[in-house]
Image: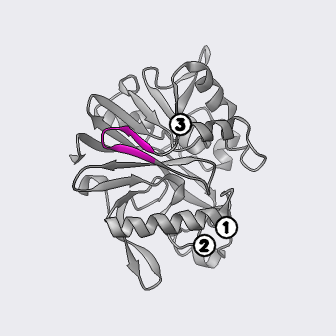
Amino acid sequence: MTKIGPYTLYTIETGRFGLDGGAMFGIIPQPLWSRRIEPDARNRIPLHMRCLLLEGDGRLILIDNGLGDKYDAKFASIYAVDDQAPTLDESLAQAGFGRDEITDVILTHLHFDHAGGTTRRTSDGLAMAFPNATIHVQRDHWAWASAPNPREQGSFLAENLDPLAASGQLALVEGAGALFPGVSVRTVHGHTEAQQIVMISDDARTLVFVADLLPTSAHLAPVWGMGYDVRPLVTIEEKGLFLEEAITQGWTLFFEHDPHVVVAQVESGPKGPQIVAPRPLTDL
């Protein structure tokens, strides 16, 4: 088992999907990014929706929850949703848990591939997927998502936000700081307003759930950013400062979307920051 402080850590796979490679790598030409992640015939690159579960200190904490299962056939076709990939329920069961046992869900942000599993469609309509959990979202991000700009409107879906707003389970987080013993968040604003990245620490080490600050290990270079970022120049600055600190402090990074790398360290290389020691979470 992998432990940091009081927490036992589990990788929770919630499915796989695909996004346009050009959108995922912005201004980087396809001949360059396709060497890192090969696209399909429709130019989509394969991506995981890999979440993290923390068991300990009387809590069962899930960080992000993937796409969910409310999508229709058109959505599945556009986003290359892989129905054969492990689901959230299957991954939780493999770890020995069920949805009702989750005490807390930390959402890095409310884009559909990170927060779509927050709600479920039932015979009575939409319902909360984790009935006993507190859902932690940054206050500034909640306000941003509740009145979305045209650029992000397709990523903030009412079917994910409206039931949460009415549930009484929403807890709004005020900026950076500790959420639980050994679990803290930082905010970054390049990809979307007030995305929160999650840090799990003890005296020996720190694991950082980097979310869409670094969607894959191919995004370490400054200008290798996403076309989805609302403030690309801010992303470049935030990423540079974060990676400098990660190298200095020896942090381990947990990649949510990378098709191959789950966790890894970063070190300075001849061309800038580079991944070292990629491995599964169980080898942390």
* Residue at x-position 39% and y-position 65%: 246
Magenta segment's dominant SS is strand
Residue 67 seen in this snapshot: no
The image quadrant where one finds the C terminus is bottom left
Alpha-carbon distance for marks 1 and 3? Answer: 27 Å
Do the residues under discs 2 and 3 have CB atoms within 8 angstroms?
Answer: no
Q: Is residue 132 above or below residue 51?
A: above
Q: Which residues are magenta?
A: 177-185
Q: Are marks 2 and 1 in contact (CB under 8 Å)?
A: yes
**Does 30 appear above or below 62?**
below
- 272 vs 69, left or right, is left
Q: Amino acid at mark 1?
A: Gly
Most extreme residue toward the bottom is 270
Residue 253 position in % (x across, y down): 38, 59
Q: Nearer the viewer, residue 180 or 232?
A: 180
* Residue 146 showing in the rendered view: yes
Residue drawn at 63 percent across, 43 percent down: 76
Query: Residue 44: within the magenta?
Result: no
| Residue assigned mark 2 | 223
Regarding mark 1 in the picture, which secondary structure is present there?
A: loop
Colour convention: one colour
Residue at 67%, 44% in the rendered image = 155
The residue indicated by pointer 1 is 26
Give residue 166's position: percent from left, percent from top. Answer: 61, 20
| Place of residue 89 in the rendered image (x, y in percent of width and height, measured from the top left) | 41, 33
Q: Which residue is mark 3?
A: 137
